[in-house]
Image: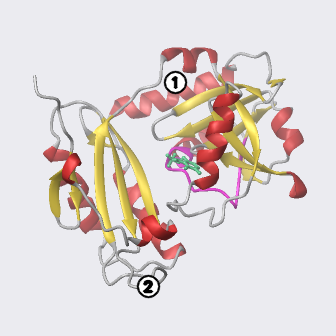
Amino acid sequence: MKKYEPICYLNGKFVRKSEAKISLWDLGLLRGYGVFDFIVTYKGGKPFLLNKHLKRLINSANLIGLTIPWKLQDLEKKVIATVAKNKNNKEKVVRIVITGGETKDGISIGRKPTLAILVQARHFYPDSIYKKGIKVITYEHNREVPQAKSLNYTQAVKAVSVAKKNKASEAIYVYKKLNKVYEGTQSSLFLVRKKEIVTPDGETLPGITRELILSICKKLYPTSMREVTIKELLNADELFISASNKEIQPVVKVDNKVIGKGVPGEVTKKIMAEFRKFVNSGRW
Ligand SMILES: Cc1ncc(COP(=O)(O)O)c(C=O)c1O
């Protein structure tokens, strides 16, 4: 059987993955200037919380000073059309990438931004991650434009490779000088202490999964978004990270410190169950 090749959208055309090409003078490539968003599907290929992701994408572009000609509805139509081109009822991940386009002098924004929509088969994490929990490391870094999903993930690439060397699944950005904890390289962070839920505020990406989890938590536990210290991180009763593809993953070890009893906690498990109920309901 012929291997399935995803169809992408690139600057107005649908093209096979192997035929999708951009200019070497694209500002995304030369300077890492651009933004993206990442969406998963459920229920046989239906993009999850698409509207919220597109709003964040447009906000990311604004935050880095990139003017784009597309309204939310234009982007929505393009994403739905691209997913439809890859129809096979299997779950997918969708990346929408917007860069500064082709630059004349290596630094000025191009005449037209590059818009690419990439679709791939969704990879699910093994059950053991959710049942046993994961180890994370701390990593010294604070993101340049924290509320934007900018293309520049240099530190994330480095941090994940350090995490792997330490047999950890994710790295959590901390800034020792200010005694602050932010988020994971590709995830939001939640702490549970005495049945209260906290997620770091301010200098973090407004995670779409985080927003949903916050609405679930608020109905069940005292919940807040505020500054979090490194000591609080290490002394939490329970910890978990969240992201579109990861969903909710319990954290049982930070560097060499075991969190709580070293297994996923009751509060985390309850929130995971409520999250699953919401996804399965299809009312999103
Ligand atoms: C830095 C960062 N924080 C948080 C998240 C989680 O965001 P979301 O829940 O919207 O997937 C991501 C996702 O990749 C991320 O890159």
Circle 2: residue type: Asp
Is label 2 in a helix, a strand or a loop? loop
Residue occupying the point 68% across, 39% down = 171
Q: Residues within 10 Å of mark 1 (few under 14, many from 20)?
A: few
Task: Reply yes or no: does residue 218 show up in magenta.
Answer: no
Pointer 2 residue: 105
Circle 1: residue type: Ala
| Residue 113 location, quadrant | bottom left
Does label 2 point to a residue whose CB lies under 8 Å from ligand 1?
no
Where is residue 100? Give x, y as percent.
Answer: 41, 74
Where is residue 279? Give x, y as percent.
Answer: 39, 33
Query: What range is drawn magenta here?
Result: 198-211
**Residue 273's disc number:** 1
Q: Residues within 10 Å of mark 2 (few under 14, many from 20)?
A: few
Residue occupying the point 45% across, 37% down = 245
| Residue 63 location, quadrant | bottom right
- Using the numbered discs, state the Cα–Cα distance from disc 1 to disc 2 in whole angstroms: 52 Å
Residue 220 appears in the rendering? no
Residue occupying the point 17% across, 33% down = 4
| Residue 138 location, quadrant | top right
**In the rendered view, does 180 fall on the left or right side of 186?**
right
